[in-house]
């Protein structure tokens, strides 16, 4: 049987482009570098926006320049975590791209940068501020920035026939962020009720709302939960406790009514 000669000599005569089957590693390296650069830009933008929220509205501990019981760092962090979970699951289901998960995280981090101008103007100003922060990085495309802007505007609420409505469109990303913003409605009852109470305190601008105000609020929560529907299947899967929370709110109504009757 004929022996094959020096293999190293044989391969040494063949162009490297053929040995590597025509694949060039440089574009792959560049792609990895771009991915790392984008991830770093996301981190920087998110951290900057969280810092702005904490500085202005605090953490719910009567801190910050203009302390808020609900629209503070805690709510922003919760919305960010919810947005990430919903978006990751939506990407797994093929409804959005994986690269858009990061955009949802940015939108959630920036959606309440402004909370002193009233509904509508708050969201427009927050979106503008987020656009500026993303633009500073020089990493995000106009398309990326526009997607984030649409997501933040989707958290604008209005009331029709006494029922609160968000402003999500048919674009799935806007539905992701709208659901993330109200994800507390489907959290376990203890977490849900703590969030609802924080919002009541913010609306009444007091740490100790009256029993009467608490009763009206609890009844309103039953109606709110009953009329609310998550946009995405992912949010329904991840935050499945709304029915339990309706029952919990009814228990609070009964307890508050009993407390008021005893005083009378």
Image (spheres, helix red, strand yellow):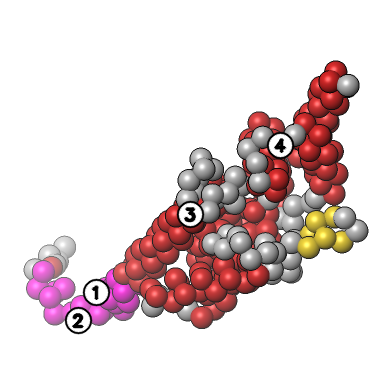
Instruction: Decide: few, some or many residues near mark 2? Use Cα within 10 Å; few <14, some 14-19, many ≥20.
Output: few
Which of the two discs, 4 and 1, sits closer to the camera? 4
Main SS, magenta residues: helix
The extreme right residue here reads 161
Q: Is residue 23 above or below residue 183?
A: below
Magenta region, residue range: 8-31
Instruction: Decide: few, some or many residues near mark 4? Use Cα within 10 Å; few <14, some 14-19, many ≥20.
Output: some
Rendering coords of residue 130 (x, y %): 51, 69
User: Does residue 248 appear left or right of residue 54 in this picture?
Assistant: right
Q: Is residue 16 above or below residue 202?
A: below
Q: Which mark is residue 209?
A: 4
Mark 2 lies on a secondary structure that is: loop
Which of the two discs, 1 and 3, sits closer to the camera? 3
Q: Is the residue under label 3 in contact with that under label 1 (CB below 8 Å)?
A: no
Quadrant containing the N terminus is: bottom left
Between marks 2 and 3, how big is the CA–CA gap?
66 Å
Of residues 11 and 103, which is closer to you in this image? 103
Q: Is residue 165 above or below residue 217?
A: below
Q: Residue 187: in sight, yes or no?
A: no
Q: Which mark is residue 67?
A: none
Between marks 1 and 3, how big is the CA–CA gap?
64 Å
Q: Earlier in the sequence, mark 4 or mark 1?
A: 1
Q: Residue 223: in sight, yes or no?
A: yes
Mark 4 lies on a secondary structure that is: loop
Q: Which mark is residue 15?
A: 2
Query: Which residue is identified by label 1?
Result: 19
Instruction: Decide: few, some or many residues near mark 3? Use Cα within 10 Å; few <14, some 14-19, many ≥20.
Output: few
Query: Which residue is identified by label 3?
Result: 65
Q: Is the residue under label 2 in contact with that under label 1 (CB below 8 Å)?
A: yes
State which quadrant residue 168 falls in: bottom right
Rendering coords of residue 253 (x, y %): 83, 30
Between marks 3 and 4, how big is the CA–CA gap?
22 Å
């Amino acid at each position: 049987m004929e022996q094959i000669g020096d293999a190293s000599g044989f391969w040494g005569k063949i162009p490297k482009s053929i040995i590597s089957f025509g694949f060039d590693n440089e574009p792959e390296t560049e792609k990895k570098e771009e991915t790392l650069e984008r991830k770093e830009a996301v981190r920087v933008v998110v951290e900057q926006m969280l810092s702005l929220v904490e500085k202005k509205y605090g953490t719910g501990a009567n801190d910050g320049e203009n302390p808020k019981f609900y629209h503070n760092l805690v709510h922003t962090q919760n919305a960010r975590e919810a947005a990430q979970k919903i978006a990751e699951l939506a990407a797994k289901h093929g409804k959005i791209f994986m690269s858009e998960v990061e955009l949802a995280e940015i939108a959630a981090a920036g959606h309440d940068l402004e909370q002193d101008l009233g509904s509508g103007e708050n969201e427009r100003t927050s979106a503008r501020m987020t656009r500026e922060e993303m633009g500073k990085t020089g990493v995000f495309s106009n398309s990326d920035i526009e997607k984030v802007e649409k997501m933040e505007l989707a958290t604008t609420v209005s009331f029709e026939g006494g029922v609160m409505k968000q402003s999500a469109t048919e674009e799935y990303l806007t539905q992701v962020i709208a659901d993330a913003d109200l994800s507390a409605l489907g959290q376990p009852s203890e977490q849900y009720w703590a969030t609802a109470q924080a919002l009541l305190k913010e609306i009444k601008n007091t740490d100790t709302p009256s029993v009467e105000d608490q009763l009206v609020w609890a009844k309103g929560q039953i109606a709110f939960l009953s009329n609310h529907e998550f946009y995405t299947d992912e949010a329904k899967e991840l935050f499945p406790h709304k029915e339990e929370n309706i029952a919990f709110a009814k228990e609070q109504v009964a307890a508050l009514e009993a407390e008021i009757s005893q005083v009378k």
